Image (spheres, rainbow, N blue to C red):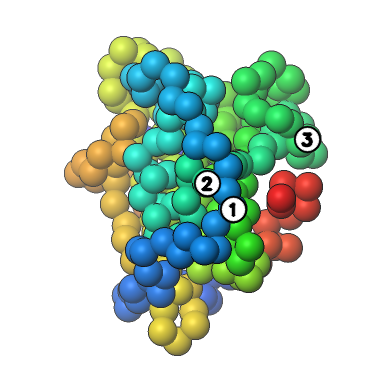
Amino acid sequence: MKTRLPVLILLAGLGGAISCKHPAPSAAPKSINRLAMKTANPPVRIGKPSTELNPFDRYLADVKSNWPEPALVRFASDCQIDLDSVPPRYAQKPGEKWILVKDLSRAQSDQETDFYHTIAVWHSPNRIMTEEWGMELDTGDYYRLFSCLNQKKITLVDSVSWSIAPDDDPAKETGWGYEHRWGLGKDGTIATTLKQFVDLRDKPISAPPLDEETKKRLDDEGVGANSWADLQLPDGLLN
């Protein structure tokens, strides 16, 4: 099996800040400081969460109906962002540039190439959380990338790269994903806290058969951003 995982390109870079052999626990507590949160009307959930098998299709459906996926709920808690109080801002990237949008209801309708990206940003007084999605139609590769920032400095990262062959039967769960989490250690550096393979619904699975090139690329993953500026996102996404 040979695949290209686009998130590896986005995260490659400052590999010196990553330590897979000596993982450090996240410094962010799970309790939420509600005094630091903005007030807003809680989002109204519409219907039920999507059951789409494709992770990106499921995400877009859930965003339209205001259903946060379980992975987002978990990461928001770690990042100290209250999803019911802090409304997100969105952008789409159909080509080379990010375009600010009100919501993702028309995502992919402006697609210019086989590559497509979306971003959601939650901004409280001191914290920023991002959820970026990307897709590559010709290879069947998808990724989700969570980032948490404190004072515009990255403290937590969670990436999942999914590989779904374009000719796979959509009714069969034949794809797989690779999740990699990083957290800020006591020494102030970002280090690996978790590596695991997951299915198309974010559930842990055994490692699938992989060629040596893919194995090496997974082993070489690193966090290539340290700050908000490094993410190269429009400042208009910040409230």
Give the label, 3 or 2, closer to the camera: 2
Quadrant in which the N terminus appears = top left
Total numbered badges shown on the rendered structure: 3
Dot 3: within a 10 Å radius of its alpha carbon, few (fewer than 14), some, or many (20 or more) residues?
some
Are circles 3 and 1 on residues that touch, CB within 8 Å? no
Measure the C-alpha gap from mark 1 to mark 2.
Answer: 6 Å
* Secondary structure beneath label 2: loop
From the image, tell me which residue sits under label 2.
85
Q: Going 68% across and 57% down the picture, which residue do you hit?
A: 231
According to the picture, the residue beneath numbered tag 1 turns out to be 38
| Kind of residue indicated by mark 1 | Lys
Q: Are marks 1 and 2 in contact (CB under 8 Å)?
A: yes
Name the amino acid type tagged 2: Ser
Q: Is residue 180 left or right of residue 135?
A: left
Q: Is residue 68 visible?
A: yes
**Mark with earlier residue (3, 2):** 2
Nearer to us in this view, 236 or 9: 236
- As displayed, is residue 108 above or below residue 151? above
Q: Amino acid at mark 3?
A: Ile
Tag 3–tag 2 contact (CB < 8 Å) = no
CA gap between label 3 and label 1 equals: 25 Å
Q: Is residue 93 above or below residue 196?
A: above
Residue 230 in picture, x, y percent from top left: 70, 62
Closest to the observer: 125 or 224?
A: 125
Point 37% across, 23% down: residue: 49
Decide: is 184 above or below 166.
below
Question: Circle 3 sits on which residue?
Answer: 99
Secondary structure beneath label 3? strand
Disc on the earlier residue, 1 or 2: 1
Tell me the residue at 35%/40% (across/down).
70
Secondary structure found at label 1: loop
